[in-house]
Amino acid sequence: MEITIQRVTINDVATLSTIAKQTFYDTFTGTCTEADMQSFLEEYFNETQLAKELSNPDDYCYFAMADGKAVGYIRFMEDYNSLPVMKQWKALELKRIYVLKEYHGMGIAQKLIDFMMDYVAKENYKAIWLGVWEHNLRAQKFYEKYGFVNSGYTHDFPIGNTPQTDVWLWKFL
Ligand SMILES: CC(C)(COP(=O)(O)OP(=O)(O)OC[C@H]1O[C@@H](n2cnc3c(N)ncnc32)[C@H](O)[C@@H]1OP(=O)(O)O)[C@@H](O)C(=O)NCCC(=O)NCCS
C-alpha cells in the first residue's frame, strides 16, 4: 500500500466532509445521544463550514492517501484562541487527526504526524498542543509515542447537550 500526503483543497470538500463525519462518528458514537451526535456532525463538518476552513491559507489540512484513496486527515494551525497561555511560545495547535478505523495501526497516522513535525521543524515552532477526550485512551497512547505529555490544562468539549472533558497535551521542542 502506497501512502502519500496531500493538501486538501476546496475541490475536496465533499470527500473531507464524508471522512470527517465518518471518523468522528466512529470515534465518539455511544459517548453521547444519537441526536447530539447528528447535530454535532452537521454543525462542524458540513461542507460550508469546512470550505471556510479550507479557504484560509494559514489553516493546514492534509489527507493521507492509501493507493489514491483518502483514508485519514490532519489539520493544524497557529491559532491561540483555544488555549491563550500558549501565546508565550511560537506554538502550533494540532486541531484534528482522524484515520478511518479500518486503517488504524498501519502507520498512516504516523505519516500524518511526521508530516506535521517536519513543518514544525521547518517553521521553527517551539511547542505543539492538542486536545484529546479524557477517555480516548488509544489516541492518548498514540500521542505519548510522539512525546506529548499532559499540560495539566483541560477544557469542556460538549457534544450537543452531552458534557465531555478534553485534556490538553503538549510537546516542547
Ligand atoms: C488516534 C489515531 C490517529 C492513532 O492512529 P493509530 O494508527 O490508531 O495509532 P497507532 O496504532 O500507531 O498507536 C495507537 C497505540 O494505542 C494502543 N492502543 C490501542 N487501543 C488502545 C486502548 N484501548 N487503550 C490504550 N492503548 C491502546 C495501540 O496498541 C498503539 O500502541 P503501540 O503502537 O505501542 O502498540 C487513530 O486511532 C484514530 O484516527 N482514532 C480515531 C480518531 C481519534 O481519536 N483522533 C484523535 C482525536 S484527539
Image (spheres, helix red, strand yellow):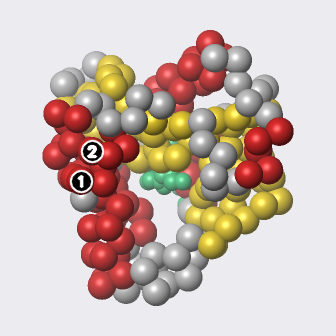
Residue, x 63% and y 52% (percent of image)?
81
Residue at x 56% of width, y 52% of height: 139
Tell me the element at label 1: helix
Residues tagged 1 and 2 counted as in contact (Cβ below 8 A):
yes
Residue 105, quarter of the rendered image: top left
In this rendering, does residue 19 appear at all? no
Q: Is residue 113 left or right of residue 126?
A: left
Front-most of residues 155 and 148:
155
Asked whether the viewer can see residue 7, the reply is yes
* Residue that sits furthest to the top in the current view: 122
Which picture quadrant has residue 163? bottom right
Dot 2 lies on which element? Answer: helix
Badge 1: how crowded within 10 Å, few (<14), some, or many (20+)? some
Residue at position x 37%, y 31% from top?
62
Give the amino acid at mark 2: Ala
Residue 127 locus on image (x, y percent): 74, 33
Give how far across and how far down residue 86 sits, in percent.
76, 44
Residue 152's mark? none
Q: Which residue is mark 2?
A: 51
Residue at 72% across, 65% down: 154
Mark 1, ligand 1, within 8 Å: the answer is: no
Along the line of sight, which residue is nearer the eye, 69 or 153? 153
Could you say which disc has been placed on residue 48 in the image? Answer: 1
Query: What x and y, as percent, mark residue 32?
Result: 43, 82
Number of residue marks: 2
Left or right: 144 as drawn, with respect to 152:
left
Dot 2 crowding, Cα within 10 Å, few <14, some 14–19, many 20+: some
> Label 1 amino acid?
Thr
* The C terminus - image quarter: top right
Residue 25: % across, % down: 33, 65
